[in-house]
Amino acid sequence: MDDELLDLFGAVSNAFHVRLQGLAVLDELRLAPFQARTLSLIARYPGCSQQALSTSTGRDKAQVARTIKELETRGLITRQAHPRDWRAQSLSVTPEGKQASKLLLRHRAQAGVEVLQDVSLKEREVLRRVLSKMRARLAASGSLLATQDS
């Protein structure tokens, strides 16, 4: 039963990511799907580090480093010395990056509305509580991007 539930969870998550990768707004912003995902994560978790992004996305450090450099070159993010770890850099969005991430968020929200249209408010609340518990467990194990001490 748990294997089936985890498979279903993974299938829904993967299908939603595929849906997001096909958003027309990516062409409009001239962003590859992973660039858009990285920009969105930096916008949601200002001050996060490259290591935190690598851990959270499951991508290798080199791919994350290239993406960060591309976003920085485009003027969408900035890097600063991390306040608590001299070896790391804190990442933040620029005003242009903030505009792009807001546009991405609107399109992501619309995709979410479509996916959840057959799920009642009560079911959504149950799902929110369950996923929050799962997220807390993963965050405690260091598998998720933390909002602080990234």
Image: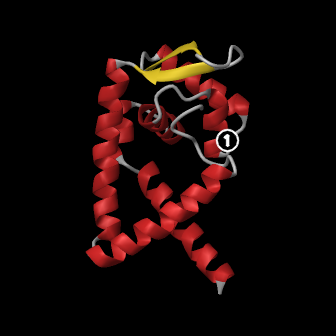
Helix, strand or loop under label 1 = helix
Query: Residue at image x 72%, y 16%?
Result: 87
Q: Is residue 118 visible?
A: no
Circle count: 1
Q: Nearer the viewer, residue 3 or 17?
A: 3
Query: Residue at image x 62%, y 75%?
Result: 7
Q: Is residue 77 left or right of residue 81?
A: left
Q: Is residue 95 left or right of residue 21?
A: left
Q: Is residue 146 visible?
A: yes
Q: Which quarter of the figure has residue 74?
A: top left
In what quadrant of the picture does the N terminus appear? bottom right
Q: Nearer the viewer, residue 122 or 118?
A: 122
- What coloring was used for the rendering? secondary structure
Query: Residue at image x 42%, y 37%?
Result: 44
Task: Report which residue position mark 1 lands on.
Answer: 55
Please tell me how crowded label 1 is: few (under 14), some (14-19), or many (20+) other residues with Cα within 10 Å: some
User: In the image, what residue type sits under mark 1?
Assistant: Thr
Percent coordinates x, y for residue 63 in the rendering: 67, 32
Instruction: Indicate whether 27 appears above or below 87.
Output: below
Q: Which quarter of the figure has residue 93?
A: top left
Instruction: Indicate whether 111 appears above or below 105.
Output: below
Q: Nearer the viewer, residue 10 or 18?
A: 10
In what quadrant of the picture does the C terminus appear? top right
Instruction: Indicate whether 64 appears above or below 115.
Output: above
Q: Is residue 148 left or right of residue 143?
A: left
Percent coordinates x, y for residue 78 in the rendering: 48, 16
Percent coordinates x, y for residue 104 in the rendering: 34, 40
Task: In the displayed orientation, state which residue is furthest to the bottom.
Answer: 1
